[in-house]
Amino acid sequence: MPLTVLEAARVIGNPSVYEDENVHAIYEEIAEHFSSTRYKPWPIIASFLSSLPCGFIGLDSGCGNGKYLPLPADRPGEVWTLGLDRSGNLLQIARAAGATGVKREVLRGDVLETCWRKGVFDYAISIATIHHLATEKRRRCAVKRLLEAVSPSHGRVLIYVWAIEQDELSKRKVFDSSSGGVAPHKGKDVVVPWVLSKEPRGKNKNESKGHEQTPPDNEEPKVYNRYYHMFAKGELRALVEEAAKELNLSITMEQNAEGRSRGLEIVQDGWERSNYYVELKLWESIKPRGF
Amino acid sequence: MVRLITHNLLACHAKDCNTNNFPLEFKDIQLEIREAEFNSDFLKGFMPKLEWKALVDTARQLGDTSLPLEQPEMVDDGFLKSLHHVLLEIHVEEGSMTCPNCKHVYPILNGIPNMLLAEHEIG
Ligand SMILES: [Zn+2]
């Protein structure tokens, strides 16, 4: 399989307009094909959702085709996830996710906005979404929205983003070595091609796998270049810590003058199959002073 | 669709709209009733997150009067069955939701509520 060397992206002008053209418009176009290649839940996300107690409600911010909405599959009806995405076409697919005939509930909205009562969710997940935001400030804002969406006393959050450090089995490589080393905590802005062939769909369901790189010949494929910010080692954790600071959440246990404290615990962070992830748990305590 | 479990979470987020922005008002709606599996533990776990008055008022607007005005302290099976139906079985398929404060209209198109704002409406 040929190795795709990803090209650098140059984000120019208004980042929101840039994302409209280089992310949102593309997902509308490739929704059906993209969805057919995204069906397998990643293990850490599946086990996070399995660990949630009965009665929890959550938000999947950037739910795409909704593959996480039916989870945990072995306990239907015990937890409930609301899907949010900007792509109406992906949401139409997400509504039927899980193929059990149960309609999933989704909203068309933006991950940088808050169209719910703050703190009302017990958990929030953001999978392969924040890396589509074109500035550090907007990525930090998206993390803040997740932290604000969940309960300050017990809310749980799981975030997944693409890593510069790609899996050995990955078909991608970020730049060539001539572009220089990667500074710590600084990711890379790249464009990732999505090749959509004009072949009639549904002919061969198994053919969809290889489409993230080279198309078969003689097909006049259309190439869509999506914007990604690929995260460097330590960058996701640093982003979370910055977001927490701006929301006055401490990462370690400490109390302010009123004996009240709010914070978050980093439950785990790591790398899994070309992605960085971080799992967070919010906490709140009110302790009497003067003892 | 929008079920009342979702409606009870949603608030207007237009620029400078911070008070009296909940609950959104349904208008011109089409309803469908679809059965869902009953799970009393889920309901009991979810109940503390509910805004009760908003739920009861909205259910009544949609023609369901099975819920008491005050959230009961003791819950029995009959109550949980009513709550289950109101939260999880009434589907608003088409129509819109209007903010009681700024009157922004969020349309429900092809079964999906559109909460996106135009650039100038974002706070
Ligand atoms: Zn409003």
Image (cartoon, rainbow, N blue to C red):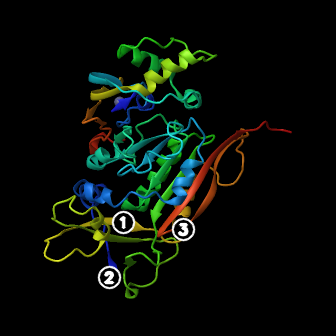
- For label 1, being within 8 Å of ligand 1 is answered no
Give the SS element for disc 3: strand
Q: Earlier in the sequence, mark 3 or mark 1?
A: 1
Q: Percent from the top left, x then y, of residue B94? A: 26, 29
The residue tagged 2 is A2
Residue at point 55%, 32% (across, down): B42
The residue tagged 1 is A228
Is residue B29 visible in the rendered image? The answer is yes
Q: Residue furthest bottom?
A: A178
Q: Which label lies toward us, 3 or 2?
A: 2
Q: Percent from the top left, x then y, of residue B65? A: 43, 11
Q: Is residue A91 left or right of residue A50?
A: left
Q: Percent from the top left, x then y, of residue B122? A: 33, 42
Q: Amino acid at mark 1?
A: Tyr
In-front residue for pair B96/A43: A43
Q: Amino acid at mark 3?
A: Trp
Q: Amino acid at mark 2?
A: Pro
Give the SS element for disc 2: loop
Q: Earlier in the sequence, mark 3 or mark 2?
A: 2
Give the SS element for disc 1: strand
How far separated are the C-alphas under marks 3 and 2?
24 Å
In-front residue for pair A146/B94: B94
Q: Percent from the top left, x then y, of residue A131? A: 41, 62
Residue at point 34%, 43% (across, down): A96
Let me know if marks 3 and 1 both belong to one chain: yes
Question: For the residue carrying disc 1, how many other residues have a C-alpha within 10 Å: few (<14), some (14-19), or many (20+)?
Answer: many
The residue tagged 3 is A271
- Can you say whether A250 is above or below B61 in the image? below
How far separated are the C-alphas under marks 3 and 1?
17 Å
Residue at point 64%, 48% (across, down): A263
Check the residue under mark 1 and report the chain it is in: A
Regarding ligand 1, which quadrant of the image does it lie in?
Answer: top left
